[in-house]
Amino acid sequence: MNGLTISISTEHIITVHVYIGSGALMYFTNDYITDTHTVMISNSLITENIEDIKTQHFLRYLQNQKSVINAAGLTVLYTQTNYLATVSVFKTNFTINDGVILFSLHYKTNHGRVVFDQVSFESNIATIESSLILLLMIDVSNVSSPLHLDRSMFHNNILVQPESAHSSLVFISLYNPLLASFKNAVTITFSNSVFTKTSVTRAGSCIHATDTGTQDKVLNIYLTNITAYDNFKTNNSYGNTETEFIKIVNAKVLHIRGYNNFSYNFGSIFGITNSLIYLNGQLNIIGNNGYMGTGFKVQGSSYFLLSNRLNATFINNTALTIGGAIYAIADDDFNRCMFQNNTNNITNIKMTFINNTASEAGSSIYSNNLYECQTDSYRVNLMNKSNTIFSFFYSKHQNFSMPPTSLCWCDVDPCCNTNDEANEYHLSAFMHPGQNIRLQLAAVYSYDSIYAHIKQYSYAAVTFLLIDRDNVHFLPSWQVSANSANQALLEK
């Protein structure tokens, strides 16, 4: 199909007073066809279409009752199991549409694929908790490559949502993927594409992918040669710092490779939860402003695997709280080292941090699991090679910090002193440069009654000793300060 124009009929809406979504429907089901089936849409215009929100409410939530044609553009339903079907969209412009402009549903099949090549998405609106491209996969097993986007442009699109809601340009969700074998995998690829001037009213993402499976992880995301700039500004020309440009939840692996450049965006560039992160190639994260972890916000059971010839550069990024470039906090029961190597022989891995800032801690990196952590089989903790891999320049504050360590707190008997006896505690903790320590001091407490006479005074004496370990020969800069003028510390 070449040279199509797909648009809504305004007269139909006015006459019938209802619509069921507009655009084209492609429905693949079991038939006598056994060979590969391909539908090509090229040199076309898909414009001024509207998503069905009356019967469906929000497409991504899969209501029990729904119309057939839902999307504001293309609806592709895959249910066949005996042949491969591919929908290819080539040199086509999606513009001025309202709601989901491509809805791709895979129901109990791994035989469907959508390919975008040289496609423009411009001036569209993702209304309420919607997305521009929506990929849903339900009860899918075996190997599948359902979405490939190459040489495409997202420009001047708007994410509109109410308070506490989340929207995205591309939303990918796997519902209960079936694990027939350990080789099962769902692969999504984004390559050679540009995202710019995405606007958002609240929280949002350009790419949001999640796997709801509880047995194991099958989702693999590949990012190659991605450019993103000037995204997530609000109507007042300031930015929304709580957005996440790429949000990945429960994926098996996120691969970042090739030449990737993310500059002058608001929010975190990567928000990764419970996913392994492979870094390769050239990665530039420059001049972004976020709330926490402006380059990477990594949580749960996530950690990094760095490949040879990686050159990752973080320059002039700012966090309103912690982690100017990277915030990486694993779960308390997950002790994998945050930065590990991907290959046996470590050669030419560079992580460079230049003039990144955070108002509270960790101008470049705020993370746990940097030291005294576990590595995978042949891998090593790259923080032990930090002098050759990690480089820090021109920061006015601490380049890396770890979460605070509390030595002692008195909350229940028999720790608490209630009978005028002097309890003295001597505790110690092994600290690394850049790590904070929080001392929980009780206030003066005086109480008189016919039953008890209690007076309690507490103070802390802090001693810092330099320990020569792992051939590290530099003196850390320690500073002790009280949280308020009403506290006093005895320092030596």
Image (cartoon, rainbow, N blue to C red):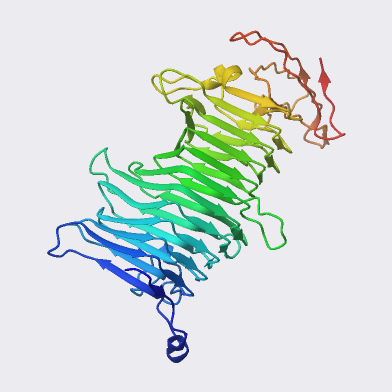
Give the residue at the far left of this rendering: 32
- On screen, residue 201 versus residue 132, left or right, reads right
- On screen, residue 112 versus residue 440, left or right, reads left
- On screen, residue 122 versus residue 361, left or right, reads left
Tell me where residue 401 appears, x and y as whole percent: 66, 28
The answer to whether 154 is drawn above or below residue 462 in the figure is below
Tell me where residue 398 appears, x and y as whole percent: 71, 28
The answer to whether 62 is drawn above or below residue 398 in the figure is below
Res. 425 visible in picture: yes
Residue found 27% across the figure and 44% down from its top: 179
The quarter in which the N terminus is drawn is bottom left
Q: Is residue 116 or residue 132 the one in the foreground?
A: 116
Tell me where residue 220 appears, x and y as whole percent: 38, 43
Res. 403 visible in picture: no
Residue found 12% across the figure and 64% down from its top: 32
Residue found 87% across the figure and 34% down from its top: 485
The quarter in which the C terminus is drawn is top right
Q: Is residue 355 or residue 123 the one in the foreground?
A: 123
Residue found 67% across the figure and 38% down from its top: 322
- The mark tally for this picture is 0
Tell me where residue 177 appears, x and y as whole percent: 31, 49
Q: Is residue 163 or residue 333 the one in the foreground?
A: 163
Give the residue at the far right of this rendering: 485
The answer to whether 52 is drawn above or below residue 156 in the figure is below
